[in-house]
Image: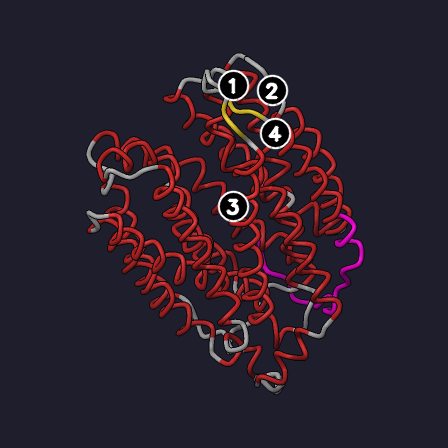
Amino acid sequence: MMPRDPGRPLLLLLAAVMSTHIMDFMILMPLGPQLMRDLGLGPGKFSGLVAAYTLSAGVVGLVGAPFIDRFDRRPLLLFAYAGFTAGTLACALAHTHAALLAARILCGAFGGLSGTLVMAVVGDVVPPERRASGMGVVMGAFSFAAALGVPSGLWLAHRFVWETPFVLLAALSAMMWVAIFMRMPSVRGHLDRGQRQDFRAFLGLLADANAGRALLFMTTMVFGHFAIIPFLSPYLVANVGIREEHVSLVFLVGGVCSVLTTGLVGRIADQHGRHRTFYGLALVAMVVTLLLSSLGPAPLWQVLSLAGLFFIFASGRFIPAQAIMSLAVAPAHRGAFMSLNSGARDLAAGCSSAFGGLIIGKTASGQIQNYHWLGWMAVGCALLSMGFASRVRSVETPSKTAVPH
């Protein structure tokens, strides 16, 4: 059985696993012009490649939810991460739209399952009073992927060929698989508690009102967040006047700011309350979102400043939010709940991007229209998420053992 005090090395290993999954998801979007040119893709086919990853992860999360808590986390993570590594390598070997689409579906399915398991393990091994700090360490992977992964991947793709980032990411993932195999202990505390892991238990989870409120909480927040993200780069280039080669700076500066603050956010949430920290971050994020989505022509320093604030507050609120989620159900059902959460979150992100595409348009001069309405939609969703968060209660009590940091 996994010891209750896993230490920082395990959290860093899980963060590294998560960073490869996030990097694989993020790197495709800025490669759009190169992929469309080299593979002869139209905008519709390219958007299908982007959506395939998220939708595949969402479907697998929902389908796998009734079964994920029946197994030791370690072998299941090894299986899922092996599939993700194979899918990433398949992306590098794909030379047609159909082959790349199949590879992206494979990556999404196994990558989404890997991400779900990582979050479940953090919930299993980190005591409630340290949960936000543990989530902050692992979710720093998002910031790392944005700060280093995406700009590096873009540089490699433009310096060599678009397949290069996927080759290197597959090699890195293979090394990470070996690290998981050698360093990660068994995680089966959810099985040792003696609770039944059958379909009736899963149906009971679906009927749990607290779990339902937690899912609505995360879904509304993700829906608003992903109304802004997919169209941010085109808006900054077409409306704000940022040069295309400077778009990577937005991710670099935002990611670095987030990397430097994720640990602090986690500690604040543990010391002053997860809900209170979430509300504070969400309120500031609303202001930054409105400023960013209504920005006219502006100098680069102003754009980078707003991007840094957006990553700190809009992305940072996911740290206390994820901690709130992990405490919303009993430990024996955490994997199933995280799988449901992952599926709902990914589907919400895909639907939000599609809905946003119906709202925005282009002028004859190429500028993006109605992007500010996406900002207001994000604010409305944030307010709803705050309302749902206030009704999510913790079902775990603090323990005497804490994870060292």
Q: Does the stretch in magenta take in 392?
A: yes
Q: Amino acid at mark 2?
A: Leu
Badge 4: residue crowd in 10 Å (few <14, some 14–19, many ≥20): many
Q: Secondary structure at mark 2?
A: loop
State whether the magenta stretch is mostly helix, strand or loop: loop
Question: In the rendered image of this protein, does residue 75 appear above or below residue 213?
Answer: below
Q: Position of residue 198 (x, y in %)?
A: 57, 85
Residue at left offset 30%, top offset 63%: 178
Residue at left offset 34%, top offset 68%: 181
The residue that label 3 is drawn on is: 140
Q: Are marks 2 and 1 in contact (CB under 8 Å)?
A: yes
Q: Is residue 75 rendered to the left or right of residue 262?
A: left
Q: Amino acid at mark 4?
A: Leu
Q: Does the stretch in magenta take in 109?
A: no
Model colouring: secondary structure
Q: Position of residue 48 (x, y in %)?
A: 39, 47
The numbered mark at residue 295 is 2
Q: Amino acid at mark 1?
A: Asn
Question: In the rendered image of this protein, does residue 26 appear above or below residue 394?
Answer: above
Q: Tell me the mark number nearer the camera, choosing from 3 and 4.
A: 4
Q: Tell me the mark number nearer the camera, choosing from 1 and 4.
A: 1
Q: Amino acid at mark 3?
A: Gly
**Residue range highlighted in magenta:** 386-405
Q: Earlier in the sequence, mark 3 or mark 1?
A: 3
The residue that label 4 is drawn on is: 309
The numbered mark at residue 239 is 1
In three-dimensional space, the C-alpha distance between marks 3 and 4, rounded to whole angstroms, equals: 16 Å
In the foreground, 215 or 358: 358
Q: Position of residue 214 (x, y in %)?
A: 70, 60
In the foreground, 265 or 350: 350
Q: Tell me the mark number nearer the camera, choosing from 4 and 2.
A: 2
The numbered mark at residue 325 is none
